[in-house]
Image: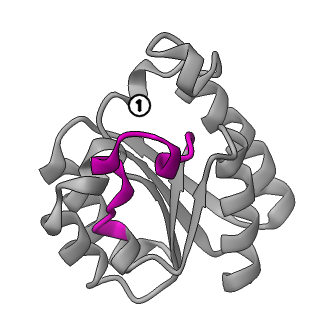
Amino acid sequence: MPTVYILNGPNLNLLGQRQPEIYGSTTLADIEAECRALAGTLGVELGFYQSNHEGTIIDQIHEARTKAQAIIINPAAYTHTSVAIMDALNTFDGPVIEVHISNVHKRESFRHHSYVSLRADAVMAGFGTHGYALALRHAARLIT
C-alpha cells in the first residue's frame, strides 16, 4: 500500500489546549485517530509525526523520500521562517500538501508568507482540523 506521511511542526502537540478560539478543542491525538481511520478506507498507510524541532522535521522529510509517496505537512510557525524545510521538501519527488488549521491570510501579516507553499502542490487553510482529512483524501487520490 502507498504511504502518506503527515508531519506536524512546533506547538501542535498543544492542540486542544493552546488558543482554542483559533485552533479549536480537537487534540493532535484526535486528528491522528481520524486520519488513521480514514487512511484505512482510502487504502493508504500512514506515518504521523510531530516535532518542535526543525531538524527532526527535516529528518522525517528525508525518511519520506524512501518510505512515502506523499507528504502532508503542517509546518506551523516554520511555515514563515524555514528555508531548510522548504529545501528538504524540494528533495521529495511525490506530492506535498500544506495544511493550516486557521486561515493564515486573515491573521497577522507575517503569516501571509509561506516558504513551504513554494513547494506545495496544494494548500489547505482555514478548514479547521478537517483540513487534514481533506488533504489525506487528496493525497490518496494523487497516489493510488
**Position above or below: 72 against 18:** below
**Which percent across, then down, holds residue 11?**
33, 28
Give the side of residue 45 with respect to residue 114, left or right.
right
- Which residue shows up at 29% across the image and 35% down it? 10
- For the record, the magenta segment spans 101-116
Give the side of residue 93 with respect to residue 78, left or right.
right
**Position above or below: 128 against 57:** above
Image quarter hosting the C terminus = bottom right
**Position above or below: 121 against 125:** below
Q: Is residue 113 magenta?
A: yes
Residue found at the far right of this picture: 41
**Which percent across, then down, holds residue 4?**
56, 65
**Which percent across, then down, holds residue 36?**
69, 45
Q: Looking at numbered disc 1 in the image, what kind of residue is underneath it?
A: Leu
**Position above or below: 120 against 107:** below
Give the side of residue 140 with respect to residue 97, left or right.
right
Mark 1 crowd level (few <14, some 14–19, many ≥20, 10 Å Cα): many
- Which residue shows up at 68% across the image and 34% down it? 33
**Which percent across, then down, holds residue 117?**
40, 72
* Residue at the spot of label 1: 12
Residue found at the far top of this picture: 17
